[in-house]
Amino acid sequence: MKSLGINWFIEGSIDFEYKKYILLDYLQEINRYFDKSKLYPNLTDLIFHYNNLLYFKKNKSMLQQAFPQRLTQADIAAVKLTYQKIVDDDSSMREIEQIIAYALQKMDPAIQTGKEIYDFVESQLNIDPVGIVPLQPFNGYFSLRNGRQRTNFIYEYNITIFENKDDKYRGININFIDTYEESILNTPEALKLNLIRRNQYMPNPAVYYVQSDITFPLEQTLLPVAKRSLVKYISKAA
């Protein structure tokens, strides 16, 4: 996929028409992916750039906060130098503010489209525990079925908890284990027994059967949405 530089709106030629061309080219490709129900990494990247613009707009003097996720110390120093060259130039700052306002206006509907696709995919997911769920279900396995496809994808998962002074966040790490063809004999229950035999270090694992009613792109849509939905499901149940 095409990508924007971290500080695309202030580097190089600060010209509204030029930046507009770069942005629209980027959004055109984002929307091409969305038209095919391919969400990731496009939606994540789009939200990242949208938030960077908001941070810059709200607090232009603190650039290290404007790009909190991706910048190294060297990047921060480079952006500061760029900023110092334009901060006293009223015409350049007006041009940047125009670029930011336009970009936010254009990015917002694309983000809403991505979120609508996400919500639709999530609404098509069914999550069911297989057998008895242990008291601590934050480690285990899940089987993922994509629409009517008989092939199931098996993943081991580990849910982690991050805390700060204001809130608690949960993330999930997964490892692909295997695939199996679902049948009358090859059921999620049979899968759980097989996993217990294969991996005795986890004698009573939590196992979930995750299935979508519609077929979606696996890596770019279904798996990322399934991971987040499983975290919500387990956190609520626990």
Image (cartoon, rainbow, N blue to C red):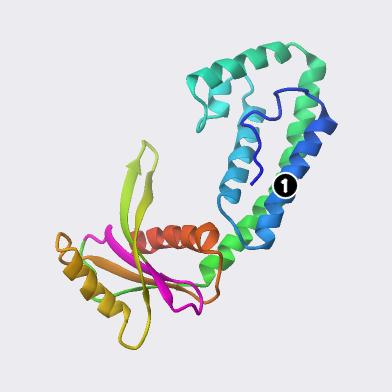
Residue furthest right as drawn = 17
From the image, which quarter does the C terminus lie in? Answer: bottom left
Residue 118 position within the rendered picture, expressed as x and y whole percent measured from the top left:
57, 61
- Mark count: 1
Location of residue 155 with respect to 125 vertically, above or below: above
User: Does 148 appear in magenta?
Assistant: yes
The residue at which mark 1 appears reads as 27
Location of residue 54 with respect to 47 vertically, above or below: above
Looking at the image, can residue 90 be seen?
yes
Location of residue 40 with respect to 8 vertically, above or below: below
Q: Of residues 174 and 44, which is closer to you in this image? A: 174
Q: Label 1: state its secondary structure.
A: helix
Looking at the image, can residue 238 be seen?
no
Give the class, few, some or many, for how many residues have Cα within 10 Å of label 1's Cα (few <14, many ≥20). Answer: many
Residue 105 position within the rendered picture, expressed as x and y whole percent measured from the top left:
75, 43
Residue 194 position within the rendered picture, expressed as x and y whole percent measured from the top left:
22, 73
Q: Residue at x 59, y 50 (%)?
A: 43
Q: Of residues 28 and 120, which is closer to you in this image? A: 28
Q: Residue at x 29, y 69 (%)?
A: 207
Q: Of residues 93 and 24, which is closer to you in this image? A: 24
Q: Residues in magenta?
A: 136-153
User: Does 35 appear in magenta?
Assistant: no
Examine the image and state in which quarter residue 82 appears.
top right
Is 138 situated left or right of 82 in this image?
Answer: left
Amino acid marked by disc 1: Leu
